[in-house]
Image (spheres, rainbow, N blue to C red):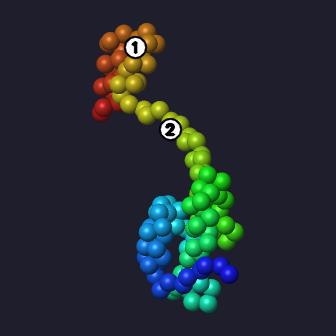
Amino acid sequence: MSNIKIYGSRDSATSALRKMGIEARDYNLFIFKVKEDKTKVECNFDLADAYLKNKHKFEKPLGSHKLKYIKVPKPPKEPKPPRKTLSGDVREMILAGKSNQEIWTIIKDDGS
C-alpha cells in the first residue's frame, strides 16, 4: 500500500512536504495532478521518505512533470555596412593625397 494523499490545493501538499524537511526545489518530485480532477493534487509520501533516506542516490520518479529548458544559440548577426559620412569622405581624400584646396572645393560642391 502506497502512502499517497490527495489535497485540494498544491499549497497544502507543499506544506506537508516542508514539514518533512523536503526543500522547495524538490516538491515537483512528489506532487502530481489527479487525473480525474485537475483541480486537486496528490502527494506521494513513500517517495518523499525514500528521498530523505537516500538523498544522494535518488532518481526522479516516472511521470515527474519537471520541465527541462534547452538554450538555443542565437544566429550570428550580420555586420552592418559602414556608414557614409562627410568626415569619412574627407579622411579618404586626405589618405588619397588630395590637397586642402581640392578637398574644400569638393565639400562646397556637395553642400550646395
Question: Closer to the camera, 17 or 77?
Answer: 17
Q: Position of residue 79 (x, y in %)?
A: 53, 37
* Relative image position of residue 103 (x, y in whole percent): 35, 17
Q: Quadrant location of residue 15?
A: bottom left
The crowding category of the residue bearing disc 2, from other C-alpha atoms within 10 Å (few below 14, some 14 to 19, many at least 20), is few
Residue for badge 1: 94
- Identified at 46% across, 74% down, the residue is 16
Q: Residue at x 48, y 76 (%)?
A: 13
For the residue marked with disc 1, what is the amino acid? Ile
Which residue is pictured at 68% across the width and 81% down the height? Answer: 1
The vertical placement of 85 against 63, above or below, is above
Disc assigned to residue 29: none
Spot occupied by residue 72 in the image (x, y as percentages of width and height): 60, 51
Q: Among all residues in the image, which is located at the extreme bottom?
A: 36
**Numbered mark located on residue 80 in the image:** 2
Which residue: 62% across, 57% down?
A: 54
Q: 2 left or right of 9?
A: right
Q: Amino acid at mark 2?
A: Lys
Compared to residue 25, the image places residue 73 above or below, namely: above
* Quadrant in the picture for the C terminus: top left
Q: Secondary structure at mark 1?
A: helix
Drawn side of residue 90 relative to residue 78, left or right: left
Residue placed most toward the observer, 55 or 109: 55
Circle count: 2
Disc 1/disc 2 C-alpha distance (Å): 25 Å
Is residue 65 in view from this perspective?
no
